[in-house]
Amino acid sequence: MKPTDLGAPDYLHKVVDCQWACPAHTPVPEYIRLIAAGRYADAYAINWRSNVFPGILGRVCDRPCEPACRRGRVEEQPVAICRLKRVAADLKGDITDRLPQPPQQTNGKRIACIGAGPASMTVARDLAVLGYSVTVFDSGKSAGGMMRSQIPKFRLPDAIIDEECGYIEGLGVEVRLDHWIGSLRDMLAGGWDAVFVGTGAPRGRDADLPGRQEAAPNIHLGIDWLANVAFGHTTSIGRRVLVLGGGNTAMDCCRSARRLGGEDVQVVVRSGFDEMKASPWEKEEAIHEGIPIHNFLVPVEFVHDNGRLTGVRFEKVRAEYDAKGRRNLVPTGEPAVLMPCDDVLVAIGQENSFPWIERDIGVEFDRWGMPVLDAKTLQSTRPNVFFGGDAAFGPKNIITAVAQGHEAAISIDRFCHGQDVAIRPSPLTNLVSQKMGIHEWSYANDVSEDRRRKMPVRDLPATLGDVRLELELGFDVELACKEAARCLNCDVATVFTPRVCIECDACVDICPSECITFTADGEEADLRQRLKAPANNTEQSLYVADGLKTGRIMVKDENVCVHCGMCSERCPTGAWDMQKFALHVAHAGAEVTPA
Amino acid sequence: MTYLAKPKLLRADTPRNALGYTRRDYEGAISTLCAGCGHDSISASIVQACFDLDIEPHRVAKLSGIGCSSKTPDYFLGNSHGFNSVHGRMPSVLTGAALANRTLLYLGVSGDGDSASIGIGQFAHAMRRGVNMTYIVENNGVYGLTKGQFSATADKGSKNKKGVVNADSPIDLAALALQLGATYVARSFSGDKEQLVPLIKGALHHRGPAFIDVISPCVTFNNHTGSTKSYDYVREHNAAVNRLDVILPKAQIEASYPPGSLRRVVQHDGSILHLRKVGVDYDPSDRIGAMNHLQERHALGEIVTGLLYVDSSGDDMHAHLNTVEKPLNQLGDAYLCPGSSALAALNASLR
Ligand SMILES: Cc1cc2nc3c(=O)[nH]c(=O)nc-3n(C[C@H](O)[C@H](O)[C@H](O)COP(=O)(O)OP(=O)(O)OC[C@H]3O[C@@H](n4cnc5c(N)ncnc54)[C@H](O)[C@@H]3O)c2cc1C
Ligand SMILES: Cc1ncc(C[n+]2csc(CCOP(=O)(O)OP(=O)(O)O)c2C)c(N)n1
Ligand code: SF4
Ligand code: SF4
Ligand code: SF4
Ligand SMILES: [Mg+2]
């Protein structure tokens, strides 16, 4: 096998599973160590640089990092990364003096961002600190986009959104609220150097079934209904509520309905329980709040009594898989099921819609009505118009919107300077030994055997009585320290120097996860079968080094290394060392390193 | 050495043996030996062998003397019986234990100082008596624990760390064991687990005295140029006579070998030793030939490794002494102490 080049882009980054999985590549283990050290403001600052909304994301992030977390492979549960982010936000104190200051003089460039969701706000932040004059337009009454208008307050209180959008406004970004943009053509005529479209995916998909029109007063589109709840326009709902759909919007709908007087709230989903799009923790919460979830039921009719909704009729289906593994839902032939109800919330999907963008101004759309974009630069077919967030590739989540905001800001900055937007600045990386003494490292290398901590929550009656009362209480210092200790410091990389290895096997013998093997060279597939312990996770790299005296190679399976440093402690010659790999993705203004 | 204990976290696909144990279940306390000490690799090989053989840890008694090597039983088989005896006296304690309870697997672990210097007499008699045991010497040519003085296995002409030349002739424990009646004699190297692990497995399945001399570099006091027990020297001068595979009675035989390259030895318990020829034409059933081969090669500066001699037809001490099958602790007081009338009868019969 080809020897591993630790300097190759992405090799060590991939080993830090959480950071690699995070769309914004937040340096997770670094901030977790800072939390363990009680340096909450520093931990917050690292997050703020990467993901802009640590307090918000610490509560409601979709957390793609957690299923990726190494801890889930060597134990059962991943580190509660998201909860720890919230700890940093909760305990940070005043951080205003750490925020960057925009330059005294603007650079003369004017940027318009349409929509005040996380994508636009990220673009605004990244560009404001470089001296751009950024104006954000939003039709709503406050900044935040769907974080403000759709995510229920019991998950994300307004104060947190106010604070973190406030930091961005504090950089001199002008946010024009109550301002609907009705024409991109007019907007472009305003002489902006670039326009960023961060208008989200604002339209809820409807269930066009018999009875829909007749029973309309009691059938609500989930995301619109949630906005009405968020802004206090809707304060009650019928006693019996059916929620159609299996995504996170459905979960927010049912849990909100429960808090607005819905006593008998049930979720009905076409797919099976495991295939539901909602995050596992959202499903758990719903069930915990007394909301049953019914699966494999497809709605066929809204049943009404002269326009008064009385129930929904469902057809029973089961999943069948074709030769290609694609799932089809086929009727079981059993009798239809009628579920009585007073109100229905339809949460079966979200769509993009750009009625305000003229189709003859050079911004091309594909046949699904989505803008034609360069996936990396987010530039549209009209060079000075960029997209990001849900508006770019359909509904995703906040952290994806932030990551795309960063990329779009880089593109806009390069565009405004007449540079090629396709050329991207590389991340800032560093690799430094953590050795402090014979058995001393500058990180805690004793691996905690503790299990994941549970989030303390308010008691059920209190939280079900108030739709704006935050459910989760956050970790206190003690819980935070215990949980932080579970992090395996995946960024502290094992670095091997074959030249000084005497092949004494000490590292092989001590390694608690049996991931090191010295053996004859071979092809990867063959090698994977010959290692001390099976290496069947091909998503994870093999670290291979040659140049040993016996002609064998050293193979380390990165999959289950717990970064305990024992290999390095046992090595008599220092052939193994633990070195911290730092990676900060480039943001707008970063220099491009010549190839 | 390390200060931390190994974390107990186990990956979901951790290999388990027929008893459901993982390799980790055969480990002991965290080793306090120097980082890179060959002895740690021997401990790991013992762990691997016992794991592979599905040995129940409580069926093993591990005994040792004094020295870095003799400390190692603390670092493997944490759930087995152990006895850390006096310097050079492990063989007599093991012999006594074996006499009292023959149902356990006896594993003697010793050093070259412990066995070839202070304990040479005990070593010799345990071999002569045919004690049913696996006797491993972790041979580094020095007294590691007392900071690197030459031991009795140090080669004449080899240099210590300060450059002083050893003037005394070495004892070859494998050659001695051959002469004294050991019925399974092997030599190996701590840095070659592929060779060592099967040799330990074969020994654990052997009836009678099984001796393995394992060259095990002392990284701290005997791993320099001029040493004949360093990692580099042993690798350069290693002359293996064969490679062993141990096949348990129940196991299916899958491996195929080119004709003429394989020797098969069936042991008492039905386990089969497959000896693959390496280079020379070597006959491991020829005791005199083995002794000659060792001397010849040693004169050429080579270190002969592999299964040097095996005789699976021999008896052990229990047969020689006609001892009782049952462990003494299961015989009961009345049987063990039949009373004064029985004694009187015995005395009378001898008058
Ligand atoms: C019910 C629900 C729950 C969710 N929960 C989570 C969660 O827990 N975690 C998570 O990560 N994500 C969640 N999401 C998804 C997340 O909210 C979005 O992915 C994210 O907000 C997208 O950000 P954005 O910047 O692309 O746009 P948005 O947040 O959608 O913001 C777009 C803004 O643009 C405004 N706008 C649109 N058109 C115009 C116009 N022409 N003129 C002026 N203003 C305009 C809109 O009013 C809106 O304020 C949830 C979504 C929903 C619907
Ligand atoms: C009766 C007695 N004499 C001397 C000693 C001192 N002593 C301790 S260990 C040792 C030598 C051990 O050498 P070896 O058996 O080769 O073990 P190693 O440390 O090299 O593994 C000696 C002489 C002792 N402990 N007891
Ligand atoms: S253990 Fe820590 S560094 Fe490793 S993936 Fe999990 S959170 Fe990230
Ligand atoms: S740090 Fe070294 S000893 Fe620890 S698990 Fe990783 S490879 Fe094994
Ligand atoms: S002194 Fe030598 S024999 Fe003893 S532990 Fe250290 S390296 Fe091993
Ligand atoms: Mg010694």
Image: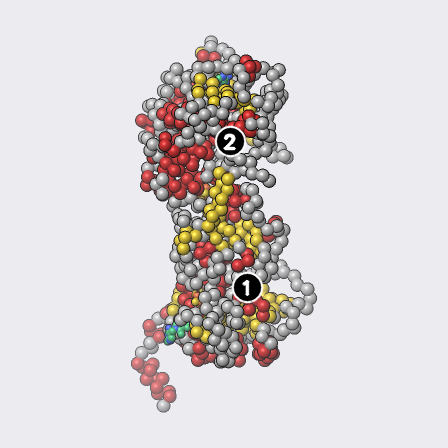
Give the farthest residue toward the top: A306
User: Rounded to the nearest whole Å, what is the CA distance between mark 2 and mark 1?
Assistant: 54 Å
- Front-most of residues A581 and B106: A581
- Front-most of residues A249 and A305: A249
Ligand 2 sits in which quadrant? bottom left
Q: Position of residue A59 (x, y in %)?
A: 40, 31
Give the farthest residue toward the right: B259
Residue A588: which numbered mark, if any?
2
What residue does disc 1 label?
A: B192
Mark 1 lies on a secondary structure that is loop
Residue visible at 54% across and 22% down? Answer: A194
Residue visible at 50% across and 74% down? Answer: B159
Identify whether A336 is placed above or below A545. Answer: above
Instruction: Tell if the residue under mark 2 belongs to the same chain as the one under mark 1.
Output: no
Can residue A241 be seen? Answer: no
Query: For the residue marked with disc 2, what is the amino acid?
Result: Ala
Q: Position of residue A100 (x, y in %)?
A: 42, 31
Q: Is residue A192 left or right of residue A460?
A: right
